[in-house]
Amino acid sequence: MEYQELLKRRTSSRKYTDQPLTNSEIEAVLKAGEYAPVGSNRYHDLCFTVVRDREVLRKLAEAALIRRSNTDEMAKIINNVSNADEILEQKNAYDPFYHAPAVIFISHRKQDLEPHIEWCNAASAALSMHLAAQDLGLGSCFMWFALDSMRRIPELDHTDLLDLPEDFQPLLGLSLGHIKEPLPERDIDTGRITVNWIGEYEK
């Protein structure tokens, strides 16, 4: 798919079909993560974990389910999400991973050499995989809430289930699955983000 078309069709998918993902589909998305730019070329500081085990995902969702009960906070968090009302109406059916058949967790070695660059590296890999999924006709969505909830409620932190290398921590996730139909190309309002020009600007 041509890149500008890909961007116009890009979306955060929160509904998936029951069709299972093949290993080759997941591997193609993972490969895109390895193509992402990483600070100082330290690719060995990243780790991708593919989770298909529903019981592991259920445990990783426990803190998010507790936090989900605070409807005022949730309303503020998802205020700009297109299906915010639908998400808020969900009770026992709520799943922070949106019932995706697979979730890729992006972890990074804890940093002291270049503190905070781990977030840049994780986001770079996540975006690369997100766009690759779109190009393959798959759906995906950045996963933040479940991991952030475990950081806020440490007694429900089950990230040990990810079996990460020593000194690695999970920073982001990416849900992945088949969607019913691809998003049509759309015109995006490009005035949503403030842009400042420093120096001469010619129209």
Image (tube, helix red, strand yellow):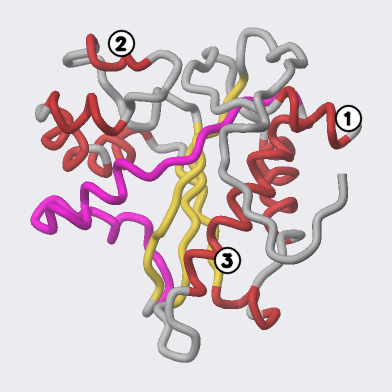
Q: Are marks 2 and 1 in contact (CB under 8 Å)?
A: no
Residue 23 lies, in percent from the top left, at: 67, 38
Residue 171 lies, in percent from the top left, at: 41, 59
Residue mark closest to the camera, 3 vs 2: 2
Query: Which numbered circle lies on residue 1?
Result: 1
Q: Is residue 181 above or below residue 164?
A: above
Mark 2 burial class by Cα count in 10 Å: few <14, some 14-19, many 20+: few
**Distance Cα–Cα, label 3 vs label 2:** 33 Å
Which residue sits furthest right? 2
Mark 1 burial class by Cα count in 10 Å: few <14, some 14-19, many 20+: few
Residue behind mark 2? 85
* Amino acid type assigned to the residue bearing label 2 in the image: Asp
Query: Which numbered circle lies on residue 121?
Result: 3
Q: Considering the numbered disc 2 on the image, is that residue within a helix, a strand or a loop?
A: helix
Q: Which of marks 3 and 2 is nearer the N terminus?
A: 2
Q: Which of marks 1 and 3 is nearer the N terminus?
A: 1
Q: Give the range drawn in magenta.
A: 137-166
Q: Considering the numbered disc 3 on the image, is that residue within a helix, a strand or a loop?
A: helix
Residue 170 lies, in percent from the top left, at: 39, 60
**Distance Cα–Cα, label 1 vs label 3:** 25 Å
Mark 3 burial class by Cα count in 10 Å: few <14, some 14-19, many 20+: many
Residue under the point 53% across and 60% down: 122
* Amino acid type assigned to the residue bearing label 3 in the image: Asn
* Amino acid type assigned to the residue bearing label 1 in the image: Met
Q: Which of 105 and 113 is in front in this view?
A: 113
Q: Quadrant of the N terminus?
A: top right
Q: Which of 155 and 134 is in front in this view?
A: 134
Residue under the point 11% across and 35% down: 66
Residue under the point 37% across and 67% down: 169
